[in-house]
Image: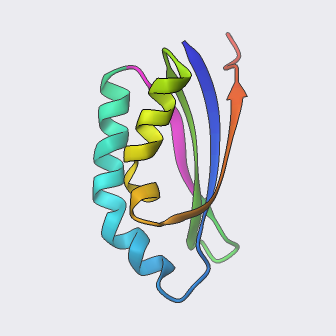
Amino acid sequence: MLQYLIVAYDGTDTEAQERRTKVRPLHLETARDLKLHNRFITGGAILDNNGKMIGSMMVVQFETEDDLMYWMRNEPYITGNVWQSIEVKPFKVADI
C-alpha cells in the first residue's frame, strides 16, 4: 500500500472553530471507517499553545493514488471547508 502523511491547517477566520466543531463527528466517523479498512495508521489534532485545535495530521494508506484522491474529495474536513491548507507527502512508516 502507498502511505501518505497529511498535515492540514484550519482556516483562521472567525467561523473556523464553528466549522470544525460542526463537521468533527462526521470526520471522526470517516476516520473510523478508514481504520476499519486498514487505511488509517495514526492521526490527531494539531494544537496551538493554548490547547485549541488548529489543524490535523494523519498517516493513511491506500492501494492507489486514485483511492487517496477519492478519499480527499469526500473527507468532511475538506468538503466542510475546515482545512484551508493541506500538504500531502508520500510517507513510509518505519518497520520497528
Q: Main secondary structure of the magenta part?
A: strand
Q: Is residue 10 above or below residue 75?
A: below
Magenta stretch: residue 57 in it?
A: no
Q: Residue at x 46, y 56 (%)?
A: 78
Rendered-image quadrant of the N terminus = top right
The image quadrant that residue 91 belongs to is top right
Q: Position of residue 26 (x, y in %)?
A: 28, 54
Q: Position of residue 38 (x, y in %)?
A: 40, 20
Q: Is residue 60 above or below residue 10?
A: above
Residue 40 in view of the camera: no
Q: Residue at x 40, y 80 (%)?
A: 18
- Tally the numbered discs: 0
Image check: 88 left or right of 21?
right
Image check: 93 left or right of 82?
right
Q: Which residues are magenta?
A: 38-45
Outermost residue, bottom side: 14
Q: Is residue 73 above or below residue 69?
A: below
Q: Residue at x 49, y 25 (%)?
A: 66
79, 48: nearer the viewer: 79
The image quadrant that residue 80 belongs to is bottom left
Residue 73 in view of the camera: yes
Q: Position of residue 71 (x, y in %)?
A: 42, 37
Magenta stretch: residue 41 in it?
A: yes
Rendered-image quadrant of the C terminus = top right
Q: Residue at x 53, y 42 (%)?
A: 43
